Amino acid sequence: QVQLVESGGGLVQAGGSLRLSCAASGRYPMGWFRQGPGKEREFVAAISYGGLTTHYANSVKGRFTIFRDNVMNTMYLQMSSLNPGDTAVYYCVADSRTTGTAVGIRDAGGGGPYYWGQGTQVTVSS
């Protein structure tokens, strides 16, 4: 059983920054998804088991950075230049399968057999 505990959400003004954390019970390929009000869930970013490979949605490329601390089994999402369109509940996911990959998380669009965190709210005010 994989356990994921997220933290770091909150309220920030447009143009500001925020860092999300996701502490895992082990080491896996992981990623972030989000669901804004009235929107479908969407992929944000993913990172490989070792942390050397990352993938981003076009909407966050250049503004968000995904990285991980493999000693602490914690994944992070550093978000900068936030805008109201980034307002959403952010969820971390982990793929515990031996065949799991970061690109697989990206391409499955959240439909894969992943473990999900409880979600953390990010609100960006204009």
Image (cartoon, grey):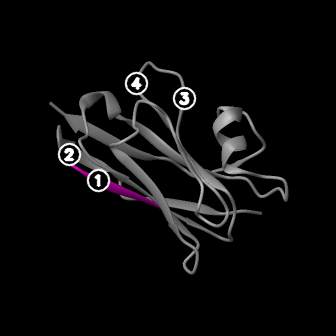
* Left or right relative to 97: residue 104: left
Q: CA distance from mark 3 to mark 2?
A: 21 Å
Q: Amino acid at mark 3?
A: Arg
The percent position of residue 22, horizontal first and vertical second, equals 51, 61
Residue at 18% x, 46% y is 16
Residue linked to disc 3 = 41
* Left or right relative to 113: residue 36: left
Residue linked to disc 1 = 18
Q: Badge 4, how many Cα within 10 Å: few under 14, some, many 20+?
A: few
Residue linked to disc 4 = 37
Task: Choose the circle earlier in sequence order: 2 or 4.
Answer: 2
In the picture shown, does residue 28 fall above or below 85?
Answer: below
Q: CA distance from mark 2 to mark 4?
A: 17 Å
Q: Residue furthest right?
A: 98
* Left or right relative to 103: residue 76: left
Q: Amino acid at mark 1?
A: Leu
Q: Amino acid at mark 2?
A: Val
> For the residues carrying marks 2 and 4, which lies nearer the camera in this image?
2
What label sits on residue 12 in the rendered view? 2
SS label for mark 1: strand
Is there a contact, CB below 8 Å, between mark 1 and mark 2?
yes
Which quadrant: the C terminus?
top left
Is there a contact, CB below 8 Å, between mark 1 and mark 4?
no
Q: Badge 2, how many Cα within 10 Å: few under 14, some, many 20+?
A: some
